[in-house]
């Protein structure tokens, strides 16, 4: 079993930045590709970005390209989502997830952390 715990969400003004963290425990973190997803009120959950198990490649949704950066520390069993130039439409609950590789449906999910961007 793998446990994922997100942190770092909060309220920020448009144009501001936040860094989300996702701490992973339970199994070998480096075996998993990690992804970030988000769900806004009344909308379906959507892909934000992902990083391969070794951290060598990252993938982003068009809405995140150029503003968000995913990184990971296998030594700390943690994956990060740095979000810059935030917009009100980025408001959502953000989830991290673990999968055997990028592009495969995640096997494990965190509980989510709320990000609210005010205009």
Image (tube, rainbow, N blue to C red):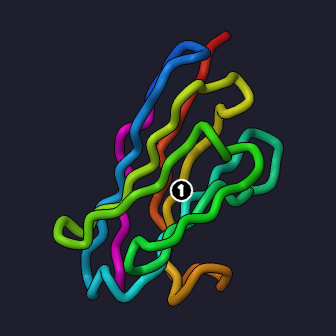
In the drawing, does residue 119 fall left or right of residue 57?
right
Residue 98 image point, x, y percent: 48, 76
**Residue 32 sits inside the magenta stretch:** no
| Residue nearest the viewer, comparing 101 with 55 | 55
Q: Is residue 16 placed above or below 21 in the rendered structure? A: above
Residue at x-position 26% and y-position 64% = 73
Return the residue found at the far left.
75
Which structural element holds mark 1? strand
Residue 89 image point, x, y percent: 74, 29
Q: Is residue 35 placed above or below 46 in the rendered structure? A: below
**Residue 2 sits inside the magenta stretch:** yes
In the drawing, does residue 108 fall left or right of residue 47?
left
Q: What is the quadrant of the N terminus in the image?
A: bottom left
Residue 39 image point, x, y percent: 69, 49
Residue at x-position 63% and y-position 40% = 66
In the drawing, does residue 102 fall left or right of residue 112?
right
Residue 12 image point, x, y percent: 50, 18
Q: Is residue 4 placed above or below 26 in the rendered structure? A: above
| Residue nearest the viewer, comparing 64 with 1 | 64
Q: What is the quadrant of the C terminus in the image?
A: top right
Q: Quadrant of residue 63?
A: top right
Could you classify mark 1 by the number of other residues whose Cα lies within 10 Å: few (under 14), some (14-19), or many (20 or more)? many
- Which residue lies under the disc numbered 1? 95
| Residue nearest the viewer, comparing 77 with 1 | 77
**Which region of the structure is painted magenta?**
1-9
């Amino acid at each position: 079993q793998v446990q994922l715990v997100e942190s770092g969400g909060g309220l920020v003004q448009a144009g501001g930045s936040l860094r989300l963290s996702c701490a992973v425990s339970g199994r070998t973190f480096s075996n998993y590709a990690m992804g970030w997803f988000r769900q806004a009120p009344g909308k379906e959950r959507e892909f934000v970005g992902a990083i391969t198990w070794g951290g060598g490649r990252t993938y982003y949704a068009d809405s995140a390209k150029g503003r968000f950066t995913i990184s990971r520390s296998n030594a700390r069993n943690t994956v990060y989502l740095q979000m810059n130039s935030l917009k009100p439409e980025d408001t959502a609950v953000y989830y991290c997830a673990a999968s055997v590789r990028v592009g495969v449906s995640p096997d494990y999910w965190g509980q989510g952390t709320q990000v609210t961007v005010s205009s």
